[in-house]
Amino acid sequence: MHELVLRAAAGQVQALSDALMDELAAVSVSVEDADVDSDAEEPLFGEPGLPAPRQAWRQSTLRALFDSEAAATEAATLLLAQDWAHGLRLESLRAVPDTDWVRLTQSQFAPVEITPSFWIVPSWHATPAQAETVIRLDPGLAFGTGTHPTTRMCLRWIALEASQRPRSQRLRVLDYGCGSGILAIAAALHGANDVEAVDIDPTSVETSRANAAINGVTIACGLPDTAHGRYDWVLANILAKPLTLLAPLLAGRVAPGGSLVLAGILERQVDELRAAYAPFAALAVADCDEGWALMVATGAATPQDRA
């Protein structure tokens, strides 16, 4: 790849960008303030609700990438010869190393340890030697790859609870707001034999179904109205506001003696959630991680049950 760097006046930027992309076969074009990181740097924004004071910097630096040196040289020659390009300046034309963007992105996602024996591992990584239970999961469109504290806390809770429960004991689980399906998959891998994953986002439903297949487990995936009856575990890793609104529904899905597990709650929101669920279940903080709290209630009940 070869990079062509040009310095242009404000009135030339749009025409140059269009010419580079539409006519001169640039792979990409970026524009920045030519005075960036100096006392002359200009922000291109105004007060909220008001138009920006300027539409372009007085002087801009354009960086255009080309597949070959010949293409970059031809582009520079043609642009500098245009009548409207008076004052346009060639800053540099140089070779740049090719970047494997896929590999670079993958390098940012390493295996995630949930417990010493339970790991979340991207498909391109080898399984850690100490891992006994593994979820294969790649970053995608749906939330939940195991890197966020709320997801990690839920996964730790699942692993701990499962270790204290006989594998032969029937376990029905609901993952409400499933995202990638990671919690439902974890429950299935830890012995749950009836697992449902629901979400209001159809993309999340399809992603959960695909991730379950990759991990060799069976979970029922659908929209929220497909969940029926009571569950031994009701897991919801969403956010505090929707969790508050969903209090009667989620608590009402918990079987007698079952557990309600809520995440997506900041530590400062704990009292708010505890109060919202008080008519239905006694929530308590079970774990904290980086300012987030995991709240759990055992034996949640509907108002009818309490009557």
Image: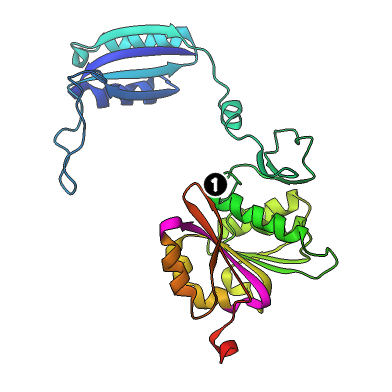
Report whether 197 appears left or right of 28: right
Would you call the spot at circle 1 few (<14 residues within 10 Å), some (14-19), or many (20 or more)? some
Taking the view exactly as shown, the residue that stands out farthest to the bottom is: 307
Q: Is residue 182 visible in this depiction of the protein?
A: no
Residue at image position (49%, 81%) is 279
Residue at image position (45%, 7%) is 70
Relative image position of residue 69 (x, y in whole percent): 46, 7
Residue at image position (67%, 73%) is 258
Report whether 14 appears left or right of 236: left
Q: Nearer the viewer, residue 157 or 136?
A: 157
Is 86 drawn above or below residue 145 in the view shown? above
Q: Is residue 60 magenta?
A: no
User: Could you tell me which secondary element the residue under label 1 belongs to?
Assistant: loop
Q: Main secondary structure of the magenta part?
A: strand
Q: Is residue 265 magenta?
A: yes
Rendered-image quadrant of the C terminus? bottom right
Relative image position of residue 45 (x, y in whole percent): 20, 37
Relative image position of residue 259 (x, y in whole percent): 64, 70
Q: Nearer the viewer, residue 48 or 51?
A: 48
Residue at image position (15%, 46%) is 50
Q: Quadrant of residue 23?
A: top left
Q: Amino acid at mark 1?
A: His
Relative image position of residue 235 (x, y in whole percent): 61, 64
Q: Is residue 146 visible in this depiction of the protein?
A: yes
Report whether 150 appears left or right of 222: left
Q: Quadrant of residue 21?
A: top left
Which residues are drawn in magenta? 252-268
Is 131 drawn above or below residue 268 in the view shown? above
Question: Disc 1 designates what residue?
Answer: 148
